[in-house]
Amino acid sequence: AVQLAESGGGSVQAGGSLRLSCTVSGDTARKYCMCWFRQTPGKQREAVAGLYFDGGSPHYAPSVMGRFTISPDNANNTLYLQMTDLKPEDTGVYYCAADSFGLSGGKLGPANDYNLWGQGTQVTVSS
């Protein structure tokens, strides 16, 4: 079975940086459209960055444009999310998701477009 495993979350002060990793096991990530989502209490899961793992252009939510960078690592079957200039409103649980049917088109699809999910990693940004 294909599994996604996130790591790299933690607690930082505003202005700090974190890098999240999502390792794909059980299949090659190059077959998938992939996306990072985040969820805060009381809100819907929000797509923040997505792409085709096999060379697609990245897409970002306006709230993270210029601060977050999504990038694939083919050699390690891993997707990264580099987050800089973090703000308290970036706090949430970050999930890695994969779309094996191409529904998202490599962009920021709704959560229903993604059929594979990791367990999530907590990011907390204090002011």
Image: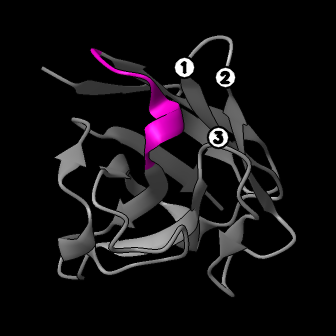
Q: Is residue 90 above or below residue 60?
A: above
Labels 2, 3: front one: 2
Q: Which residue is mark 2?
A: 74
Relative side of 92 to 3, left or right = right
* Amino acid type at mark 1: Asn
Q: Residue at x 61, y 12 (%)?
A: 76
Picture coordinates of residue 80, whole percent (x, y): 64, 36
Tag 3's secondary structure? strand
Numbered badge on residue 77: 1
Q: Residues within 10 Å of mark 2 (few under 14, many from 20)?
A: some
Residue 107, picture quadrant:
bottom right
Could you say whether the residue bearing mark 1 is in a helix, strand or loop?
Answer: loop
Up/down of 1 relative to 48, above or below: above
Real-space Cα distance between discs 1 and 3?
Answer: 27 Å
Magenta stretch contains residue 28:
yes
Does the residue at mark 2 contact the one at mark 1 (Cβ under 8 Å)? yes
| Front position in the image: 113 or 21 | 113
Mark 2 → mark 1, Cα distance in angstroms: 5 Å
Amino acid on which the number 2 mark rests in the picture: Asn
Q: Residue at x 68, y 73 (%)?
A: 59
**Vertical relation: 117 (above or below) 57:** above
User: Considering the image in quadrants, where does the N terminus appear?
Assistant: top left
